[in-house]
Image: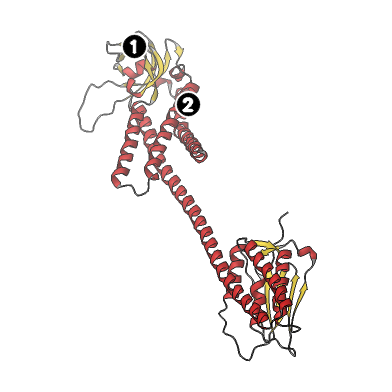
Amino acid sequence: MKKFKSSIGVHLIVAVALSLVINFSYLLVPIITDQGVRQRGTHQDESEHSVGVLHISPDLHGYIICECEQRDSTYVSGWQVRTFKLQEGDTLKFTTKQPQMNAGSGLRGVHPRLDDVVMRNGEKFSLDVIYDSPSRTVEFIWQIAYYAVIAFVLIYIFISGRRREGVSIWVSLMYLLVAVGVASLALYCAPVVAFKDGMMRIVFFFESQPHDNVYFVVLTKILFMLVVSALYAFVYTLMQQRQRFVLENERLKNENLSTRYNMLMGQINPHFFFNSLNSLAMLIREKDDERALEYIDQLSYTFRYIIQNGQSEVTTLKSELEFAEAYAYLFKIRYADKLFFDFDIEPRYHKWTLPALSLQPLIGNAVKHNSITTKNPLHVSIRVREGVLEIENPKHPKLDVEPSTGIGLVNLSSRWEIITGRKIEVVDEDDRFIVRLPLEQPKA
């Protein structure tokens, strides 16, 4: 519902903006026209003006009979009579224009037409009378409100037609025809200023008797609004589709990360479980009950840690170190006085975080891939340097090298990148092996 209201608000803002663009230049026409008339009245030669008396026929068309007998009568259209509020017997000072005729028509005796009225009954005439009622503010409000509503309806129709995915071409054509029908109705009912009941009023287009200029202006506004609404709907739906694709990709990415993480955890647990059973079996065969019981206690702790943190993505370094010490104890029981773990961690790093169960595969690999004897013991160092956890051990290659799948290190690298978005660093030299794990600072 919130998203729906937000989109409606955006469409309304666009509709009002479109209405302003459509009407702003149109509303300047009266001002420009009025200024143009005044400029012509100021600079036009007085010798070009004519003076005559207006006579209006029953059909409201008029003729101005000039005082100068050498001049023919001047035709006044019904629209000019109504617009200029001319009356029978008005004495007019005016300018004329010759009627347009087709080339070669051979028409004769066609009266010149009224162009501008300069004075009426001895008083200066101004086109401000056209806009004395209603005011330009009222006309502006009517125009903006009407075309904003029509623009919003057209936008909604076009967006509704494009919102449906997989619609047939006939359905799309139906929405287009509906939009064209609405535009035609909007043209028919457009508000215009016209002469009615003896005064200028805002009326529907079909109630007026518009001349060619008014018809062209209204038609241009409707067509422009129709095209721009269709383009806006096209761009808007493309942006909505792009947003849906982004959200869908994020959802699939999160599901993929979760699936991969669960798969990696499933691979770690069996590996650790089988190694633990082998060590426990060795103690039982040696019939060392005390160490076996201690081993079971440490083993239960490690399993409890795995169960509690198996579904957790991150844990604190302190918790991970406690687990690593318990896990390392299991190996020290097996390699008595031949395997040593050196922990060098400053307390200030205890609250830093890392993916859970990160040290287990590294400790396991160090034991698995190196020869551990009384003469050649193995020292595994675990330390933190500038926010990076380092696990280092010397390389004591075994004579009988065990096959390695590399799955432990690959799993660790994948998990680290999935959870933290950062990569681990592996240094494999001739005499030592180092893995550097970048820690995450605790959030304030």
Q: Nearer the viewer, mark 1 or mark 2?
A: 2
- At label 1, counting other C-alpha atoms closer than 10 Å, the crowd grade (few under 14, some 14-19, many 20 or more) is many
Q: Observer-nearest residue: 45 or 78?
A: 78
Question: Could you tell me which secondary element the residue under label 2 belongs to?
Answer: helix
Q: Which quadrant, please, contains the C terminus?
A: bottom right
- Pointer 2: what residue? 31
Which numbered tag is attached to residue 2? Answer: none
Q: Quadrant of residue 195?
A: top left
Q: Observer-nearest residue: 38 or 325?
A: 325
- Position in image of residue 141 (x %, y %): 48, 25
- At label 2, counting other C-alpha atoms closer than 10 Å, the crowd grade (few under 14, some 14-19, many 20 or more) is few
Q: Observer-nearest residue: 136 or 127?
A: 136
Horizontal relation, residue 112 to residue 140: left or right: left
Question: Could you tell me which secondary element the residue under label 1 belongs to?
Answer: strand
- Position in image of residue 218 (x %, y %): 37, 30
Type of residue at label 1? Leu
Res 34 seen here: no
- Position in image of residue 13 (x %, y %): 50, 36
- Position in image of residue 323 (x %, y %): 70, 68
For the image, the number of numbered tags is 2
Vertical comparison of 225 with 131: above or below: below
Which numbered tag is attached to residue 54? Answer: 1
Residue drawn at the location 74% of the way across and 64% of the way down: 318
Q: Give whichever of discs 1 and 2 has the lower sequence position.
A: 2
Vertical comparison of 101 with 289: above or below: above
Q: How is the image coloured?
A: secondary structure
Residue drawn at the location 38% of the way across and 45% of the way down: 164
